[in-house]
Image (spheres, rainbow, N blue to C red):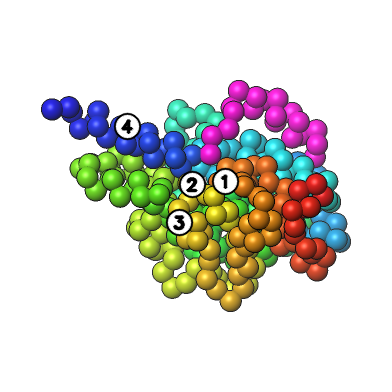
Amino acid sequence: MLPWNRVLRPVAALLLAAAATLVPAATARAEAAVTSSSGWNDYSCKPSAAHPRPVVLVHGTFANGIDNWLTLAPYLKNRGYCVFSLDYGQLPGVPLFYGLGPIDESAEQLDAFVDKVLAATGATETDLVGHSQGGLMPRYYLKYLGGAAEVHTFVGIAPSNHGTTLNGLTNLLAYFPGAADLLSTATPALADQVAGSAFLTRLNAGGDTVPGVHYTVIATKYDEVVTPYRSQFLSGSDVHNVLIQDLCPLDLSEHAALGLLDRIAFHEVTNALDPAHATATTCLSAVG
């Protein structure tokens, strides 16, 4: 009989492959130079009267604060926003691929980063936009770390708000003794995002939202990572849940593309950030 670790590792690898938004890491240094020269993560940026709150972008699992936002950050910057992004959830010995550590600890990193942005910009509140785990993790900061006093609007793109079944793959964990423990040890953030996890049970107890924060969720019915896709939606008195295909039936974006490339989704992000000047999001928003 094969040793258990030889059976468990492929299962964990399958979960990692399905849940991760993988992006090329080899160009990270060059991308950082582009970021700096374009004014993204520019701590001298002062919010304008039109856009008085800096925007903090929160990457997803297996991503980082540069690669995840190569399209959305310039999109927002070109529209007059002060834009910032952070790295979080680093594991020892794992460069460039982040969002892997325990989600509650990552929320503490976000808390410190928001304080840094507010101090630099002089703003009293920020707006958050997150993709995948980045659309989930800030909810812990809002609920348990005082973030509701520092955040006006929170937009989640394909967020894992109620966990994922990975189209039923997570059910296989029960058939491999020790698999769940292996996943929790190797990549705690993935274990935290499995539907029914202890982390999600605590986070969602008593309601999905906290008072004082405006929530928007943008999902795609073609999401193959956070499944079922409707589990991404939040319940609450100040929540706007958006299915991107209701705005443009031709939009075929799946989980990664929705946060990395989809300008229709980006247009809906700007509507959420500035509802007073919102315009209808349609298929034509892709070229706007």
Apparent side of residue 284 relative to residue 10 in the rendered image (left or right): right
Let me know if residue 54 appears in the view.
Answer: no
In the image, residue 75 lies at what x, y percent? 77, 45
* Mark 3 vs mark 1, CA separation in Å: 13 Å
Q: Is 270 in the magenta? A: no
Q: Which residue is mark 1?
A: 254
Instruction: Give whichever of discs 3 and 4 has the lower sequence position.
Output: 4
* Mark 3 vs mark 4, CA separation in Å: 23 Å
In the image, residue 224 lies at what x, y percent? 49, 46
Apparent side of residue 174 relative to residue 71 in the rendered image (left or right): left
Task: Give the residue drawn at x 55%, y 31%.
Answer: 96
* Mark 2 vs mark 3, CA separation in Å: 8 Å
Q: Which residue is mark 4?
A: 10
- Pointer 1 local density, CA inside 10 Å: few below 14, some 14–19, many at least 20: some
- Tell me the amino acid under the disc marked 2: Glu
- The residue most toward the bottom is 237
Q: Which mark is residue 228?
A: 3
210 lies above or below 11: below
Which is in the foreground here, disc 1 or disc 4?
1
Apparent side of residue 61 relative to residue 179 in the rendered image (left or right): right
